[in-house]
Every structure is written in C-alpha cells, then in structure tokens.
Amino acid sequence: MRVIFMGTPDFSVGTLEALLEAGHEVVLAVTQPDKPKGRGKEMQFPPVKETALRHGIEVYQPRRIREKECIEKLAAYQADIMVVIAFGQILPKEILEMTPYGCVNVHASLLPKYRGAAPIQWAVINGEKESGVTTMQMDEGLDTGDMLLKTTIVLDEKETGGSLHDKLSDAGAKLCVETLKRLEEGSIQPEKQGESPTEYARMLNKAMGAIDWNQDAVSIERLIRGINPWPSAYTTWDNKTMKIWDADVTEDVPGTEDAGPGEITAVSKKDFTIKTGEKSLVIRELQIPGKKRMDAGAFLRGYPLEAGMSLGEN
C-alpha cells in the first residue's frame, strides 16, 4: 500500500520500520516540529524524522495539521491509507476520510480501556495484570474509533513504564502490519468500542512523581514502577530531591506502630524501610542530585540513615 505515516516519539519508530520491511511504500512521514533540548537548547529531530530520513522518506512537520495547506499537501500524495501512532495532534475529518482505507491508529492499550495520552504508564500505576495494543479505524473522537485487531501482553510482577513501552512498541509494529494485510484482504470485522471501564489516561507530568507517604505501600510501589523512567518518583531527603527507582512492599517493622508515614523504621547494610499509610516499603534503588542511580546499600555507605528520620514533607 501507499502509506502516509504519522508519528513522533520512539514508540512510533518500530511500526514505521515494520511497514517498510513488509514492503509498503511509505510516501510521507508526518511528525511534530523539531524541539530544543538540553542545556544548549539545540534543535533535536523527533525519532520518526531521524528514521524516515535514514530510509530516504520525505518528512513533513506541520505546526497545525488542521490548516488548509496541510490538508491539500497530504491529499496530493494519493495514499491508500494513513497509519497514525503517537503523532501528537488531533486530525480533522477531512484527513480522517481522505484515503480509501482511512486512518488506522495503533494504540497502546486494550481498548476501550485507557483511552488517552499515557495508557502504558497508567496500566502499571493501576496494577493491571495485562495490557496490549489495539489497532482502530480513527474517528473524530479521542481513541473512540472502531477496533480492528488486538494483541495482549501479560505484565511482569516488576513491570515498569519503560519495559512495558518497549514490549508494546514491538507488539504494535507486528499488529499494524497484520492489520494492513487483513484490511487489503477484507478479512477484518470492525468492532464498536462501547464505554471505557477506566478513567482517561491523562498525560504525565513531573508533579505526579512526588511520593505521598500517606498513601498505601502497594500504590506507591506501582507509581514508582509506572513512571520509571519518566517522570520518575521522588521524595525529599535532607532538603534534596531523592528519586526512588525500585522498592518492595513489606509488612510493618514490629514495634513501629506509632511511626508516621515517611518515617524510616529500619536500616540494614543493603536497604532501608519506610512506613507508609498502610504497610511499608523497602527501598532498593535510588538516586540523589549529581549522582547516578545506585542501590540503597551504596547510598547508605556514603550517607548513613537512622531509624526515626523522615523522608518527604510530612
């Protein structure tokens, strides 16, 4: 098929490469404008742009895809289908209906669950046992189009947002190729979504990484995993930010019933335990300003902690 591909971040790259490998003709890659990054604020190409240029594919970076000139430009390519995966802009009806096979979206959840911008991380945060990828025929709603194909991934006990991202990116690439094949064959029966049983998977931000030790240990541990590697969970220690990368839920240390949330209740050579609103957390891996990630034992050798100290702003 003649494909117009729309995507921006790393998550989209595998699907673009899979389409090329399957023999599809990607006539245009549409992605977000370059953005300044780092301290030097140098302009950086989106991952999809880098990949497209490497394969000799023309790149188009409109600021607003809804503008008339953008719509006219896309129409000129006379594509058979548009594939959209984490593009970052809402498409108007004129684009959705432009090609014979419409716009197919690759969404990182088992729709109708987790419509929205951050389905991968929220699945981990909410303690889902499985997630997956859905391809859908896009309509004017937010992730509400008819479902085409699905694939399911079982989450590991210590799944992070980062590890699930990579698994679903690979799964989405394979599913997209299969979806286009079956659309050409006419062997897909689109399925209506119905109501979503979950809240909208809203976009992540740095503020949501602040650990509230009043919450229960299970919820905090899921948050730590869900927003690893970004925006990452953190607390305060000695008026500094301490990122928490890995922790395990445990029963409260005997004799610490009167300890408050955020209070350190036990310290060993290799880890330390913090009281939460319900149960406790053993901290395994962390990071402090100016240092790389380290296991808790390495931290304790340089920065002794004692039971009775508190983390956070409780």
Image: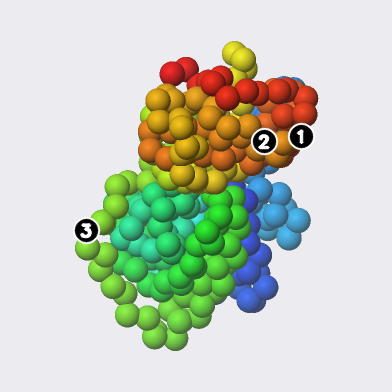
N-term mark: 1 or 2: 2
Q: Nearer the viewer, mark 1 or mark 2?
A: 2
272 displayed left or right of 198: right
Of all residues, the one furthest to the left in this rendering is: 195
Q: Residue at x 31, y 60 (%)?
A: 112
Q: Is residue 202 left or right of residue 197?
A: right
Mark 3 or 2, which is nearer the eye?
A: 2
Q: Amino acid at mark 3?
A: Glu
Quadrant of the frame with the N terminus: bottom right
Residue 12: x %, y % from top left: 58, 56
Secondary structure at numbered mark 3: loop
Q: Position of residue 41 (x, y in %)?
A: 70, 24
Residue holding disc 2: 268
**Cα distance, mark 3 to mark 1?**
49 Å
Q: Quick one: 262 or 61, which is closer to the camera?
A: 262
In screen coordinates, is 182 left or right of 28?
left
Q: CA distance from mark 3 to mark 2?
A: 49 Å
Q: Nearer the viewer, residue 238 or 33?
A: 238
Q: Considering the numbered disc 1 on the image, is that residue within a helix, a strand or a loop?
A: helix
Residue 152 percent across, percent down from the top left? 45, 70
Residue drawn at the location 50% of the way across and 56% of the way down: 85
Is 61 placed above or below 98 here? above
For image coordinates 49% across by 45% down, the residue present is 250
In-image side of 294 versus 30 (left or right): right
- Residue that carries the numbered disc 3 in the rendered image: 195
Q: Residue 147 location in percent, x, y?
A: 34, 68
Q: Nearer the viewer, residue 201 or 5?
A: 201
Label 1 vs label 2: CA separation? 12 Å
